[in-house]
Structure formats: structure tokens, C-alpha cells
Image (cartoon, grey):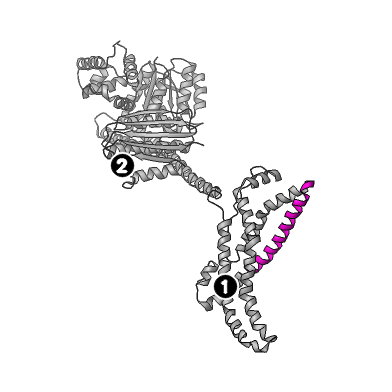
Amino acid sequence: MSSRTAWQALAQHPLGFLASAWPWRALAYLLSGVVFGAIAMVTLLTMALAGLVSLIVGVGAVLLLAVALSGIVVTRIERRRLRLVDPDPAPDPHRAPERPGPRGWLETRLREPATWRELSFTAVSMTALWWMDLLVLAFALALPVLLMTSPMDDPSAWPWVVIGLCLLPAAPYTITAWAGARAALTRLILAPRDGELGRELTEVRASRARLVDAFDAERRRIERDLHDGAQQRLVSINVMLGLAGLDAEPGSPVARQLALAQGEVTLAVDELRELSRGVHPKALTDHGLAAAVGNLTTRSALPVTVDIRLPYRLPATVESTGYFVVAESLANATKHSRATRAEVHARLDADVLTLSVRDDGVGGADPAAGTGLVGLADRVAAADGRLRISSPAGGPTLLRVELPCR
Amino acid sequence: MPLNIVLAEDSPLLRDGLVSVLTRFGHRVSAAVGDADALIAAAHEHDPDIVITDVRMPPGNADDGLRAAVALRGHRAGLPILVLSQYIEQSYATHLLDLGSESGIGYLLKDRVSAVTHFAGAVEQVAAGATVMDPEVVRQLLRRRQDPLRRLTPREREVLSLMAEGRSNAEIARDLYVTEAAVNKHVSSILQKLDLRLDGHGHRRVLAVLTYLRA
């Protein structure tokens, strides 16, 4: 089994650990930490001092600004070094500049919390971390080596060689343990915060919305295919049968057969019409949410009062989702709630569609019990909306949905 | 009397079927087109007695046919229009009825074409200025206005539905296998219960009912 991090490597069989690349990777991590830390400290101290001194002539301000932003460079290298002992990438927390050009870059960076977090990490790194790397290396490697070489000066000091030899196998453990701790600390401070990961979260939502859009488009396509294809064909056949019926002698067996055939085709057309309406209501595409809900309620077994006032047509996804919510809620109210009437209300306010469906039924609608409400919530969430429901036992039930229309 | 008809239907199969039915009943289809723009052009060219159109048609594949009909009606007031639709949706019916309560409007499910004799009858009625609504529209409207209509007996509701289709009392009597006097009685009872006035014209009667139901 290969270890993902330095600490995991420590837990495996000693021979396996010592034979693996982990001690060497940890050593490389600490050595590069010392070298890089020393160089960075000297450079930054020099820049800061020079900046303070030359502040009078103005050039200093630029130098100090560079010091303030140095964390960006230092931590970029730190993140790369981190890969030595922690293969999971630590993403860059910075946003893309809002405006192009160096000025836009500078403004964005100076306003980001990540920049200042990186600066404080740099300060800690300068003052403590690389010194500790150095101490650990000295204790783990230099000390045993010193002990083992001590008889060169004083032959009577040979017992130290034994102690040095005993300490040497412990060195990889010490080094790897500290490397693991330093890597964990680095990741903790330098990994992007949730808010900075916002870009990726948006990506995920967008892809979910795309799925819903694709699904809606597919429903519309199926409805159109049914309408333009099978339905039209059946109606045409029925017309031909009707015409043939005119030519048949009234009351003859042929006329009776034709009438039977017409009855069957009519049933098929009716069923197909209901089916395609369930797939995607045409009025929703043509006239929007208010008209489609109006049509829906005229077919509903429950008397429904509709009050939908929208200033303009909403995005197709919002309309489909809204329609789905109303259709599903009314179906639930009819099936489960023993309601005698229902109300649908919708308004657009500050780019948010607020839709509520209320019934006077017995209440007790439980999202955990049925799949209907969960399906509704899924659908609403995919459109980045919010669904709330109030349904105390004894009723009434109020379902409220907010859908952003951007 | 043969009618001069312009019709628009984007499915070639059904378009041929419609032409066959209409010619079979002795009418002349001077243009049978497949999209809304061609419908408007043909209606201007042939000055028809009635325009028959589908709702969903190219170029937009939305309610282009319906909108073309509304535009034609705006251009020539009173031009009889019969809209055929795959669906009976109240929003379309309302749109059509909003053309004004003059005369000569029909809205039928496409399936009704297959009852060829009835369909030909509906075309002639609309051309003559009557209003013909699909029984399905009436059924939906009736359902919506359940409360005041609860006072009607089932038989009276049946008669009301046929009235809304633009049938005369004689036709209703024949359909229901009752005497015309019985229908007369039902009609006056309905009009009384719904507080509608009676003025003798078939289509006025329908419009009165529809106006009441839409309110």
C-alpha cells in the first residue's frame, strides 16, 4: 500500500518506511525549506530596510509594496514544495483580476484576504519555520554524525559512537514527522477558504442547471415530435377513415367497421394528446407560466384560484420549474390532502420569482415520507431556488418557492 | 353554396386530408399553405369566405397560426376564422374570443375533422357568422364556473354545451333524440338560471354563454 502523506508513511512497517522514498522526500522538503527560508529572509529584510530608508525619495514605497505582496511569491513556491510530502494539490486561492492590466491585478490582490493571509504565513516562515527545519535537521542528522566522529579527536570517546549509531536510524522518523507537521500547517493556512472556492461551487451549480436545461429541452423535443409526427398522422388517418365512411353505404358492414376504426383512432389521439401535454405543456412555451397554470387549473379536479402577475416572460428554466412546482403541488393536494380548494400565487420581485401554493387540506405533508416533495426540492435546488413548506397536522398546507431569474 | 376557403396547416398529410374533406362537401380551397406568412399572403390574394388555420406553425413553430389569424382579422374585420388545434387550451380560446364578439369565430380540436360531416357543418356555420367552440373548451369553462352552473340539471348542461358549439335548437333536438319543444324548454330554463337574455340568433346565444362563462 502506498502512503498518500508523510504521516501515513510513518505508520507503515519500519523496514518498508526506511526503504521507501518518504525519508528522502522529507529530507528534501526540510533542506529546501532551510535554503529557501534563508534566501527569502535575507531578501525580504534587505528590501524592507532599503524601502524604509529610501521612503523619503518615494522609491521606498514601491519596495515596501513589493514586500507586502511578497507572500504571493513565497507561498506559491511553498505550495510547490508541499508536493514533495503531500501529493494533493493545494489550489491557488487568488481570484482572477477584475480588470485587465497591472493596475487591476494590484487592486484585486490588495483587496483579497488571501494576500494578507499569505503575508502572515511568510512572516511566520521567516521568523520560525525555517529555523525549526534547521533545528530538526541538526538534531536528527548533525548530532549523530558529530557523536560518531568524536573519537577522531578523542579515542576514549568511543561510547559516543554507539549512541550516535543508535540515534541515526531514528533520524528518518524525526525528519518525516516534522515534515508532515510543517506540511499540515502549510496546507491549513494556504489552502483556499470556502468563499475562495466559490468559483468552483458556481461551476458545479452551472453544470447542474445545464442538466436541467438539457432535460427540459429534451421534453420539449419529445412533445414536438409527438405533435408533429404521430399525432398528425393519426388525425390524417382518421380523416381518411371519415371520408371513406361517406362512400360506404350507411348501415353496411363496411360502414360499421369504419366507424369502429374511427372510434379506436380517436381514442389513440386522445391518449397521445394527454401524454404529450404531460411531457411539456405547449401553452408554457407559447404563452408562459400564467397561461399554462391557468390551463392546468381548468383541468384540475380541485377548484383553484390563480393569481399570477408577472411583468414579462421569465427564463425558460424558471418557467418550467415553476410550472412543475404548481402541477406537482396541486396533484399532491388533490391526491393526499382532502382539500376542497387551492390558491396559486406568483409575483416577481427584485429578480426573484416567489410562487406559493396553498390548500385547505388536512396538512401533515412530510418531505421524509413521500418522494413527491423531495423531487420538488431537487428540481427547485437545481434551478438554484429555495423551497419551504408549512404543513401542520390538521392543515392548511402552504408551499412557497423562490426562484432567482438571472 | 360553395365557399372560397384559404387554409393553413403545416402537416402535408393533414393538409391534403382537409382539402379532400372540404372539396368533398363542394367547397373550393383556393390556397392550402404550410406556414403563417404564406397564410397571410394567400388570404390577401384570394379574399376568402373563411380562413382555416392550425395554431402551431412555421416560421416560429409557436402559436404563429393563431397570431396570423388575429392579424388577418385586424385587417379585415369580421373575416370568418376557424382555428384548428391539437390542444384545447383555455389561453388560446380566450385569445381568440378577445378578437371581439362580432361573429365568425371557431375553435376546434383537430380530431373533430375526422367527424367529416360535423366538421363541414362547423365550417359552414363559422363562414355564416356563427361562433363554434369545441365541446372540450366548453367542458373546461363549465368546470371552471362550477358553482353557478351547479343549478343546472345534467340534461341542461348537455344542452348548454351543444349551444356553445353553435347548434340550433333543431340540431340539438336531433342529437339528443328529443323534440324541439323540449329543447326550447331547456334553453329558456338555462338562460333563466344563468340570467342571460334571449335574442333569437344562434351565435349571439353562444357568445352570451361564453361571455358569461369567461367573466
Sequence-wise first label, 1 or 2 = 1
Query: Residue most toward the bottom?
Result: A156
**Residue contact at pointers 1 and 2, CB within 8 angstroms:** no
Question: Do circles 1 and 2 both sit on a common chain?
Answer: yes
Does A31 lie within the magenta span? yes
Residue that carries the numbered disc 2 in the rendered image? A365
State the image quarter where residue A395 is shown. Answer: top left
Residue that carries the numbered disc 1 in the rendered image? A174
Place of residue A17 in the rendered image (x, y in percent of width and height, measured from the top left): 54, 75
Does A116 lie within the magenta span? no
State the image quarter where residue A306 is shown. Answer: top left
What amino acid does circle 1 point to? Thr
Can residue A404 be seen by looking at this rendering?
Answer: yes
Residue visible at 47% across and 25% down?
A: B67
Residue visible at 59% across and 76% down?
A: A171
User: In the rendered structure, which segment of residues is drawn in magenta?
Assistant: A29-57
Q: Given the image, what chain letter belongs to the residue carrying mark 2?
A: A
Left or right of A404? Residue B85 is left
The dominant secondary structure in magenta is helix
